[in-house]
């Protein structure tokens, strides 16, 4: 078998993956719809009499991150079983093709199915809520504030973070053959805590008359005409770092996963 990437082989692998796991995907979709229905039923009961749409989007992102993490952590669970792992590793496809296939199902397909399920359940809930409000004049439904460009920017940041976390859980499923979701979650929490700790430590080291925001340092001085001295990275580098922090994490994690898969032995 050639080690070069083949779209024809990838298509056959996707087809094989889908039909071998069709029942799992069907039941997973039903589980997503069921859990969303329960969540919206709980919101329906507890959020009244003034139902705020903002709460539904908090539910959206909470379910997206939790469900996506669980699903991604199951990506390579077959490697924890000797027979299944050997069968998977010896499939006539390159590791890159297997990784791309996994990403398509765990990230792309999951996100599409989750979004469709969420807005389907939400539409039914809002329809029932509208009828409920008609018969209960004291109740109301408040739509989310239209934040325009700012809202789109927040949505983009959340989606970039979701894809990066998905990629990290896929990586964790390769490194941790058992309890991948739990161990990867602990590692993620430890990394976040370490980052917050060192940021706090840096703030303690800096003088009291200064403030910083990762790309600039502002030192206040009453004797200066403008009141402060600013040290900052150039706008071009700042823009590059901004896009790097948004979009580079997932490709980095996918690359490490690919390298790990090439080295994987059972």
Image (cartoon, grey):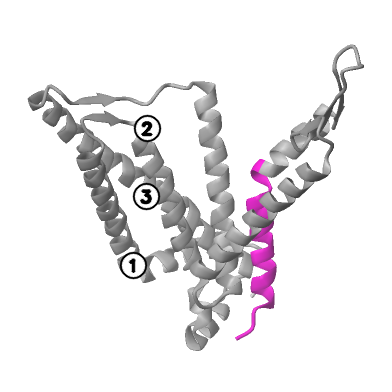
The extreme right residue here reads 223
**Mark number for residue 158?**
none
**Mark number for residue 24?**
1
Quarter of the N terminus within the rendering: bottom right
Which circle's residue, 2 or 1, is located before the other in the chain? 1
Is label 3 or label 2 in front? 2
Q: Is residue 67 left or right of residue 118?
A: right
- The residue sitting at 46% across, 51% down in the picture is 65
Which circle's residue, 3 or 2, is located before the other in the chain? 2
Q: Which residues are magenta?
A: 246-266
**Mark number for residue 113?**
3
Residue 149, compared with residue 92, is above or below; it is: above
Which circle's residue, 1 or 3, is located before the other in the chain? 1
- The residue sitting at 69% across, 77% down in the picture is 263
Q: Residues within 10 Å of mark 1 (few under 14, many from 20)?
A: few
**Mark number for residue 54?**
2
Quarter occupied by residue 235: top right
Q: Position of residue 245 (x, y in %)?
A: 69, 43
Quarter of the C terminus within the rendering: bottom right
Residue 159, compared with residue 183, is above or below; it is: above
Secondary element under disc 3, as helix, strand or loop, is: helix
Q: CA distance from mark 1 to mark 3?
A: 14 Å
Magenta residues, dominant SS class: helix
Q: Position of residue 32 (x, y in %)?
A: 31, 55
Is label 2 or label 1 in front? 2
């Amino acid at each position: 078998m050639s080690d070069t990437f083949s779209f024809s082989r990838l298509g056959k692998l996707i087809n094989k993956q889908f039909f071998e796991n069709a029942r799992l995907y069907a039941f997973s979709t039903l589980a997503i719809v069921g859990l969303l229905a329960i969540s919206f039923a709980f919101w329906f009961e507890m959020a009244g009499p003034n139902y705020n749409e903002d709460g539904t989007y908090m539910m959206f992102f909470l379910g997206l991150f939790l469900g996506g993490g669980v699903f991604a952590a199951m990506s390579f669970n077959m490697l924890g079983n000797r027979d299944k792992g050997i069968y998977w590793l010896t499939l006539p496809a390159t590791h890159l093709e297997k990784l791309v296939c996994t990403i398509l199902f765990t990230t792309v397909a999951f996100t599409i199915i989750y979004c469709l399920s969420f807005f389907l359940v939400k539409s039914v809930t809002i329809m029932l809520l509208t009828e409920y409000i008609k018969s209960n004049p004291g109740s109301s439904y408040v739509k989310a504030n239209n934040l325009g460009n700012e809202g789109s920017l927040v949505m983009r940041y959340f989606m970039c973070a979701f894809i990066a976390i998905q990629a990290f859980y896929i990586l964790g499923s390769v490194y941790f053959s058992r309890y991948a979701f739990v161990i990867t979650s602990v590692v993620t929490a430890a990394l976040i805590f370490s980052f917050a700790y060192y940021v706090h430590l840096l703030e303690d080291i800096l003088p009291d008359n200064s403030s910083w925001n990762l790309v600039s340092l502002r030192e206040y001085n009453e004797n200066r005409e403008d009141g402060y001295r600013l040290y900052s990275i150039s706008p071009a580098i700042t823009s590059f770092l901004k896009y790097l922090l948004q979009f580079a994490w997932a490709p980095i994690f996918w690359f490490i996963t690919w390298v790990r898969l090439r080295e994987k032995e059972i």
